[in-house]
């Protein structure tokens, strides 16, 4: 039986770390965000990072309550913003990216940089 290694990060850390690799502005389309994370979670190379997200099979897209709460909390903490009039784009400032890189990526997810970059690339392509 394979023994699980203890994680040094939370699901919030994973989502925040993705912002370092995403463009400064990107779509906040929940269908695309949730669907992409749900799809990538099923791939073996990303399972370790994304396994904590449970998805409900809502129509028209899978929805993770945890992912929704994380995105809301990141906005409340001002690491993520929706500043445009229609709130259809997320904005991540350079200061936020730097804080995430120093406080999360370098301390908790340093050995997962390549995988996070790949996930962000997939997410960016979907958005």
Image (cartoon, grey):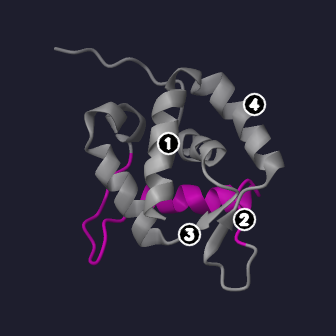
The one nearer the camera, 12 or 118, is 118
Say which label, 2 or 1, has the lower sequence index: 1
Foreground tag (1 vs 3)? 3
Q: Main secondary structure of the magenta part?
A: loop
Give residue 10's position: percent from left, percent from top: 52, 37
Q: Which residue is mark 1?
A: 11
Q: Secondary structure at mark 2?
A: loop
Give residue 111's position: percent from left, percent from top: 53, 20
Q: Which residue is mark 3?
A: 28
Say which label, 3 or 2, has the lower sequence index: 3
Say which label, 4 or 1, has the lower sequence index: 1
Could you give the CA–CA distance between mark 2 and mark 4, rounded to whole angstroms?
Answer: 19 Å
Look at the image and tell me whether residue 64 can be seen: no
Residue 98: say if magenta: no
Residue 77: say if magenta: yes
Give residue 99's position: percent from left, percent from top: 78, 39
Q: Which residue is mark 4?
A: 102
* Magenta residues (range): 53-82
Bin the neighbour count of mark 3 within 10 Å (Cα to Cα): few under 14, some 14-19, many 20 and up.
some
Could you give the CA–CA distance between mark 4 and mark 1, rounded to whole angstroms?
Answer: 17 Å
């Amino acid at each position: 039986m394979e023994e699980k290694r203890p994680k040094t990060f939370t699901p919030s850390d994973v989502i925040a770390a993705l912002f370092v690799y995403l463009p400064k502005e990107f779509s906040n389309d929940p269908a695309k965000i949730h669907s992409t994370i749900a799809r990538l979670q099923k791939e073996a190379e990303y399972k370790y990072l994304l396994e904590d997200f449970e998805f409900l099979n809502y129509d028209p897209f899978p929805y993770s309550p945890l992912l929704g709460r994380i995105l809301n909390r990141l906005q409340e903490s001002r690491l993520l913003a929706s500043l445009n009039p229609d709130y259809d784009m997320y904005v991540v400032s350079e200061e936020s990216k730097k804080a995430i890189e120093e406080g999360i990526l370098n301390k908790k997810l340093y050995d997962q940089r390549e995988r996070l970059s790949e996930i962000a690339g997939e997410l960016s392509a979907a958005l």
